[in-house]
Amino acid sequence: MAKLRTDWKGVFPACVTPFAKDGSVDEAATRKMIDMFLADGVDGLIIAGSTGEWFSLTDKERVDLFAVAQEHTAGRVPVLAGTSAIGTREAVELTKAAKKLGMAGCMVLPPPYALPSRREVIAHFEEVGKVGLPIMLYNNPPRTSINIDAALARDLAKIDTIVALKDSTRDLYQKSETIYAVGDKFAMFAGLEPYILSNVHRGAVGTVSMMANVCGPDMVEYFGLCAKGRWEEAKGPQKTVDRLYHLLSNAGAPNYVFVKEAMEILGRAGGGTLRRPYLRVDDATRKKIEAGLAEIPVKRSGKRLAAE
């Protein structure tokens, strides 16, 4: 069996981007958010990814966020830069900036909106790969209309700097086929947390978690129990995660709007203000989210499981 190209594993929150009331990036709140995640016991951070609303940030704002996160984390956990872009040139330049800052790696979608061919997707990642920064592929077909299935993952595995894959498909058959195809090279990360248990059973080593913004301690506990094969004990935090996703699907708010509203309700650092096109929820939706959260036993603090 080939050796994995990276030692990344565990829970990597897909961090929100905190904004001030005037819409500017809030550096102080970003630092508080990072402290919160480290206290939760996470294993890494993703900065300016999709949950971080990268699509509404300027390139300069993204690089500035990378710098703040890299400096404030101070090597305590690996920090990955979200360097996705529609254009290859832009993705390469963002990745170069992340490398210059000394970041551990980057997470990159296939070019959204552009609808490139399979050959063009491979060429895109070859160019980003030439920067020399470790890459986590991000497969999210609903956001890009491009599916990194097992066959495409095998071709992309020929690029040495691709070291991990976050898979956010809902197709468990495809997920398992991809894990079996490249799981001896790539660190496989579950992108949809309700699939963590089934992914770990098949060889996944981590999760890039949107919902960790809302329930970081629960997510760390859940993944830790699954990683240790303590399946019965994992049912408790798994139910919390599942119920949060059920609330999300029934709340009537877009994913990233729901996350920031829930964070604010729970007193989690970084929640609240969004950037257009997103808007704050109306009073009725806010009350619905508040009522739902009151029924879910979300942990306010937690510790990593002791090594056995």
Image (tube, rainbow, N blue to C red):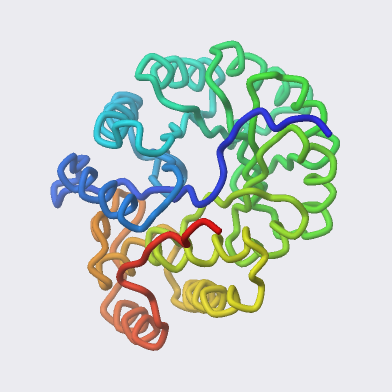
Seen at 16% across and 48% down, the residue is 20
Q: Residue at x 60, y 59 (%)?
A: 192
- Please state the horizontal and vertical placement of residue 296, each as a whole percent of the image: 42, 83
The correct choice, above or below, for 266 with respect to 2 in the image is below
- The quadrant where residue 103 appears: top left
- Image coordinates of residue 3 in percent, x first then y, are 74, 30
Instruction: Classify residue 72 as left or right of residue 6.
Output: left
* Relative horizontal placement of residue 270, taking residue 191 as reference (left or right): left
Q: Is residue 258 visible?
A: no
Q: Nearer the viewer, residue 195 or 145?
A: 195
Q: Quadrant of the C terminus?
A: bottom right
**Residue pushed farthest front?**
308
Q: Residue at x 38, y 14 (%)?
A: 100
Residue 278 location, x and y as percent? 35, 55
Task: Tell me: residue 194, above or below residue 125.
Answer: below
Is residue 285 depicted above or below 154 in this figure? below
How many numbered callouts?
A: 0
Across and down, in percent, residue 10 comes to 54, 50
Quadrant of image for the N terminus: top right
Kindly identify the residue that appears in the image at 44 percent across and 41 percent down.
46
In the foreground, 122 or 240: 240
Q: Is residue 296 visible?
A: yes
